[in-house]
Image (spheres, grey):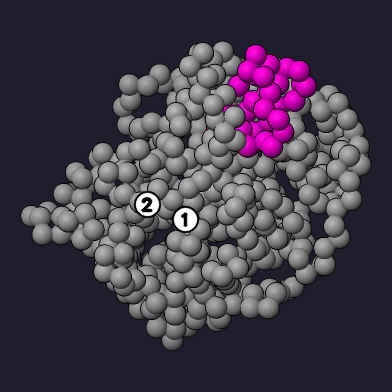
Amino acid sequence: MQAATPISIRTNTPAEDDACYLALKARDARFDGRFFTAVSSTGVYCRPVCRVRTPKRENCSFFALAAQAESAGYRPCLRCRPELAPGATPLNGAALGSLQNWSTQDASAILAQQAARLLDEPALWSDGAPSMADLATRLGVSERHVRRIFETHWGVSPLQYLQTRRLLMAKRLLTDTQLPVTQVAALSGFSSLRRFNASFVEHYRLQPRQLRKERGPVDTAPESTGIVLKGAYRPPYDVAAMLGFFATRHIVGMELVDTTQLTLARTLSLNVAKHSYSGWVQARFVPDTCAVVFHISNTLGDALPQVLARMRAMLDLDAEPAAINPCMQDDFPGADGLRVPGCADGFELGVRAILGQQITVQAARTLGARLVERLGTELPNPLPGLNRLFPTPQALAQATGEELGQMGIVRQRQRAIQSLAQAVINGDVVLQPGVDIPATLAALQALPGIGPWTAQYIAMRALRWPDAFVAGDVALQNALGVRTAANPQQAAEAASQRWKPWRSYAVVRAWASLAAASKTAVTDKIPD
């Protein structure tokens, strides 16, 4: 079927609308979250996968963003629930994740897309809602320019975009949980219950409590299952490969993977608005419906948006195969469902990457387990098999060389880990999506024991940079057939140019192809 053309502004071409209507008629999950259908006869906007009867073509308008549909006066469908749609990748093209390269694209369009991407990153605004001054500072332009280019490109203001995101999060929490309305308002980013109620009524024409009445009773779950929330992804998605990746690397006491039940669970600690929260999260895949069900411990209830964002990034649920696959299908046939495994905590991933230098995945896993057992802390309300938290930067920065040495961590790795921990404590390095990629790569490589391989690996999995490329990786060079070249790293870089800006996905596919060919686990470590 013809792919739906990405939409940017509210006035679409007939070809764009026709392609979207075809996807709507087919209820094609590949386009879930890439556009929304607004129906004039009902005043409601839906996802392409909505199971209601397909509306007439003349009654349909198509929008790239939920905020655009709401700005036009439409309400979210209570059946397909637009708040559950996978996030769209705002940037399509060579500038994705970084504005460092020259581009023939309109620079204002790139900035508008970058602004939307930043507004979608809860981790960046953990101390409160982003102001236009914050957004402008991150983009390196004036506040007036941000507003102008955003409205020109998307047809809505940054405030309208942010307001829609907040309201959809509130709708999600009101529908899926029994949290008090006051807590729902706070978690969704509203400064007061009065403002939340007024906004909800203005946009959705019903009170928050009315939504719960229309929803009907929610099954009362046992305390042990925590808070249950739902999510979605666009197919194809190779669930077995993703779970297999994490199963091979899981740390006892901190992570659990059940490939039969299609579940992944782990402990998690995070800081939000100067408060610390810890608990556990379980994700269960439901491939038949392209869905994921999250069970989140009640102790993380006051950080739900941040927890959801981390888990979606960890499982790469917002990837757009229709944008990624075309440039690499010829080189990696049959690998369209592979995603880039992320992480739940950037610092943890950085430490684990350092531990894995020059050794096998199994050996790195053993070192990680020792680190968690000796320097991690007990989870206050554990689940069976999940009772430890990964060590904090403070704990690792204060650890003695003797302590680390007894775990089998050599001095070079000790110095790298503790330097990274101190850099994170000082704020010199921030390991989360949405940061400045070139600056973060430079800061990482300025630390002892962290070279290009580790920095790119961290960028790929912790920073969620889709164009990271570990050119010096031996396994990657073997998979690309350039290991015997005069300069394998240079040859790998040259070969990778045709996969831009999705080289992280090419790396994962190359590793998978090598593993399939050898029928053995791939050791994806290389000295820095």
Q: Quadrant of residue 389?
A: bottom right
Q: In this view of the protein, can residue 141 be seen by the observer?
A: no
Element type at marker 1? loop
**For the point 31% across and 27% down, which residue is it?**
102
**For the point 45% across and 42% down, which residue is it?**
321
Residue 247 located left or right of residue 445: right
Return the mark for residue 121.
Answer: none
Query: Which residue matches tag 1?
Result: 238
What span is colored magenta in the figure? 33-62
The three-letter amino acid code for the residue at tag 1 is Asp
Return the mark for residue 335.
Answer: 2
Q: Is residue 118 above or below residue 69?
A: below
Q: Are marks 1 and 2 in contact (CB under 8 Å)?
A: yes
Quadrant of the rendering where the N terminus is positioned: top left
| Residue at the bottom extreme, as displayed | 406
**For the point 40% across and 19% down, which residue is it?**
106
Q: Is residue 461 above or below residue 266?
A: above
Q: Residue 525: x, y in percent?
A: 31, 66
Residue 186 located left or right of residue 112: right
Q: CA distance from mark 1 to mark 2?
A: 8 Å
Q: Is residue 154 above or below residue 2?
A: above
Q: Is residue 109 above or below residue 368?
A: above
Element type at marker 2? loop
In-front residue for pair 523/328: 328
Q: Residue 403: x, y in percent?
A: 47, 83
Residue 77 located left or right of residue 202: left
Q: Residue 18: x, y in percent?
A: 53, 19
Q: Is residue 143 magenta?
A: no
Q: Residue 497: x, y in percent?
A: 25, 40
